[in-house]
Amino acid sequence: MQLSKEGVEFIVKEETGGREYYEKVYKSTFVWPGGRSGATAMVGIDVGYYTISEVDAIFKSITTPEQLKRIHAARKKTGVEGREACKTLKDIKFSWETAIEKFEEFILPKFTKLTMRVFPGVEDLCDGAQAALVSIVFNRGTSLEGSTRKEMLQISKLVPDANYLEIAEQIKSMKRLWEPTSGLIGRREREAALVEACA
């Protein structure tokens, strides 16, 4: 499955806020998004959840050995530990061009494959629905177990029938998981709108 250009741009915008936000607010370095996140760089690369080999593949060619060692030290550190680890990486910066290059080379293929595993049949959906579901997996992971994942489980059952309107409703239902002021509320609305446009 290959996302459309618009789909890729949608995910990049959701993860970074766009180039201006990335450069002026994120300051092109590591940030801590909050919650159970770890230190996160470029387009949503949360090193708290990445393996040794993945960190090497992504960062080795664009950092010094000393910087890479510090990034490795941030692995498996999430939540409060991730926030503290992020503070040790603030001097390491990545240009917007590098962020997009690494996203397209390493990150997007990984999460596209994960989305196909979580939602079998997603490759047969329209472009907007594909982008929305990859965006959800990128943001929420792959688990379908537990009360916080009931919508994702339901979506997995709706995808084979391309039931776009009900998939969109399930995405909107996920908003119950966050406070009304959370940025994820708007993200779920925008993802749902992409799916609804396919109906």
Image: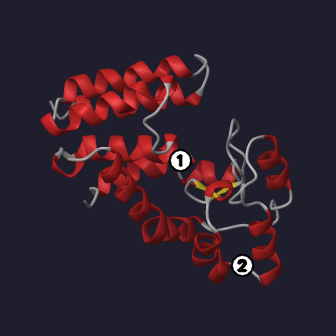
Q: Inspect the image, locate mark 2, and give the three-letter code of the amino acid beneath it.
A: Thr
Q: CA distance from mark 2 to mark 1?
A: 22 Å
Callout 2 touching callout 1 (CB < 8 Å)? no
- Residue 92 visible? The answer is no
Q: Is residue 81 above or below residue 148?
A: below
State the image coordinates of residue 81 (x, y, percent, origin top left): 82, 47
Image side of residue 164 versus residue 186, left or right: left
The three-letter code of the residue at mark 1 reads Glu
The image shows residue 130 at horizontal and vertical percentages of 27, 46
Residue in the picture at 34% in, 42% down: 133
Q: Earlier in the sequence, mark 2 or mark 1?
A: 1
Q: Which residue is mark 1?
A: 15
Classify residue 50 by image quadrant: bottom right
Element under label 2?
Answer: loop
The residue that appears at 69% across and 51% down in the rendered structure is: 26
- In the image, residue 53 above or below residue 187: below
Q: Is residue 60 visible to us here? A: yes
Q: Which residue, given by chain and number where applicable, does mark 2 sit on?
A: 63
